[in-house]
Image (cartoon, rainbow, N blue to C red):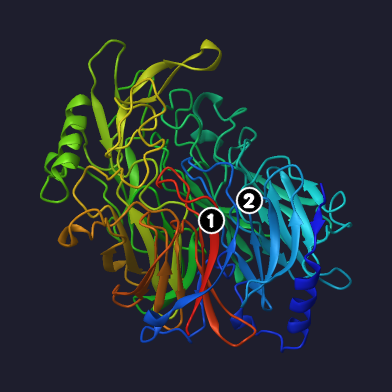
Amino acid sequence: MRPIRIAIILAIAALSAISAQQPATPAADWPMYNRDVYGTRHSPLTQITPANVSRLRQAWTYRIGRYPDSGGLTGGSEYTPIVVNGVMFAGTATSIVALEAHTGKEIWTFDVPMGAPSKRGVGYWPGTGASPARILFTSGRRLFALNAANGQLVAEFGSAGIVDMGQSYNGSPTVYRNLVLVGTNSAPGAVRGFSAQTGAKAWEFRAVPQEAEAIGFETWENGSWKDHQGAISWAFSMTIDPQRNTLYAVFDSPVPDYYGGNRHGDNLFANSVVALDATTGAYKWHFQTTHHDLWDYDIPSPPSLLDVTVEGQRTPVLAIAHKTGWMYILNRETGKPVFGIEERPVPASDVPGEKASPTQPIPVKPGPIARVEYKPEDIVTANETTPEHAAFCKALEERSGGFYNAGPFTPYLHRAPGAPPRSTILFPGSVGGANWGGTASDPGLGYVFVNTMDEASIGWIELRTGRGGARNYNRNSIVGATSRFQWSDGTPDGGGNLVGSGEKAWPCQKPPWGNLLAVNAGTGDIVWRVPLGITEQLPPEKQRTGRLNMGGPMTTAAGLVFIGASNDRRFRAFDSRTGKELWVTSLEMSGHAVPITFQGRDGKQYVAITAAGASALNDPAPAGAEALVVYSLP
């Protein structure tokens, strides 16, 4: 296979145009996944304003191809491109490309050998001395380095431009100084640093303690920390405080996700944010959001960092929006809660051999950012949607043996062999709450913005036969293992009613089903909350239901919040102070990705999003519809 394919005519024209113009200023760029290492996703550009945003029109598109995981829970592209000095670097289903950012013309293309590139993003290292600027990306367990100017593999990096990381990582590498920081999508769970120049491994921090007396080992009772393979770090990016040289790593749940009879204790550093020395990986502090996880409440996205005034004192904070339905605001120097977090009693588990944590950490402020409990009167009726939808949902409740919910962190009930169904309904379900899309912030306002969804998991824990005939406790439901309280069916012996459910699998509780909200990080108050998305199959007066969503927001200094995310195939802009929707446009496919904004070499501000949603939340789209879509003012 040819590793490099250069579109010669387009490359010469594009490079000639670039060299004839002035270099772009840093304010014009979007140089990393979150735009900055603080994770703000905030641009200082102000050309597009609340007054003129309604005039945005499509400027160009670039087709990116269909990804092999289309149809899965997070299928399709979730790509956030970057822009440096007027050049956009993006990924397709098979390649990494450099494009003229204001026209979409190809400069170079690198075809990834023996696999697909990460569908989340790339990192950019500006180079040093004789080493040119580099584009860094992953493909499974391989870390690639390309010359940013021509797309060729960098010979001095690893073995001819490729490093074997040891474990796979499917996110966007975070570049800090001369380090490339990556997480893990496979066991053992860890975060690691590699030299951006040579590819040599610099350090590793493992999520589970590796020896007796190590920090956190006592939270794994009976030595269950030994050889435990869980707590990966799958967030698509990382955040760093350069002034404090601190990396804030986040970790997944222990395995198995829904039964902890073989891992009694709080299980550090699973479900935790851990502050590490960014250059050595040395431990500084941690905060665990869920003790002894039984719900798959991993932390799916890194925190956003900003400085705000709290009771008259300028305070460095971090904000984590979580699948649990809460936002945790901590002092990022110490890890201490800014507005208080209480260890509140939660229901016990009745599963044999299980020992649930008697308490869970629940923030005093902000209040819940998503639904965290359920009452029988919350079920949808025909008044909110349709008679057919409401009837299905009521029947699903009855088939499930009714629903048990005792508030936040309600455990799954045990169902003995041959016993009739008895089901827990859990809000948020295992997809959140807030998911991998994470937050954006406006440092001037001190606001943190996040999109959330209210989708319940339903079911029980039963003894099941797994691979090799092994008998283990695991989750199941009347509609299968991956179970949701939504308008789609399944059977107990199937994969679950999320698989292949699509856009018409409306949730079964009263709307709204998805929201966008703003939190004042200086006070802990929720400033505004609005439904995100519409259900256009309903009459106009019922359409503002909010929608299930994956992907996150970004902000601008002009006072705008841009977001795709919702599975109604729309891209929107909101007023950051009020939450008023100011602009909306239709997409061929939903934009389950974080959008960006940049200034092109023609002086115009652009907004871009990858619209390639092909997950379980989406219906099939026309072949070839997956695209990077870019907008500007006329």
Residue 199 shows in the view: yes
Q: Is residue 107 above or below residue 602?
A: above
Give residue 170's position: percent from left, percent from top.
62, 47
Give residue 9's position: percent from left, percent from top.
79, 72
Give the class, few, some or many, for how many residues have Cα within 10 Å of label 2's Cα (few <14, many ≥20). many
- What residue is shown at x 22% (from left), y 36% (from top)? 405
- The residue singled out by tag 1 in the image is 626
In the picture, measured across the screen, residue 356 lies left or right of residue 631, that is left
User: What secondary structure is found at the residue carrying circle 1?
Assistant: loop
Give the class, few, some or many, for how many residues have Cα within 10 Å of label 1's Cα (few <14, many ≥20). many
Earlier along the polypeptide chain: callout 2 or callout 1? Answer: 2
Residue 346 shows in the view: no
- What residue is shown at x 79% (from left), y 48% (from top)? 163
Which residue is nearer to you in this view: 590 or 262? 590
- What residue is shown at x 16% (from left), y 44% (from top)? 380
In the picture, measured across the screen, residue 575 lies left or right of residue 405, that is right
Which residue is nearer to you in this view: 106 or 159? 106
In the picture, measured across the screen, residue 218 lies left or right of residue 365, that is right
Figure label count: 2
- The residue singled out by tag 2 in the image is 93
CA–CA distance between discs 2 and 1? 10 Å
The amino acid at mark 1 is Glu
User: What secondary structure is found at the residue carrying circle 2?
Assistant: loop
Q: Is residue 404 above or below residue 577?
A: above
Give residue 80's position: percent from left, percent from top.
56, 62
User: Do callouts 2 and 1 mark residues in contact (Cβ within 8 Å)?
Assistant: yes
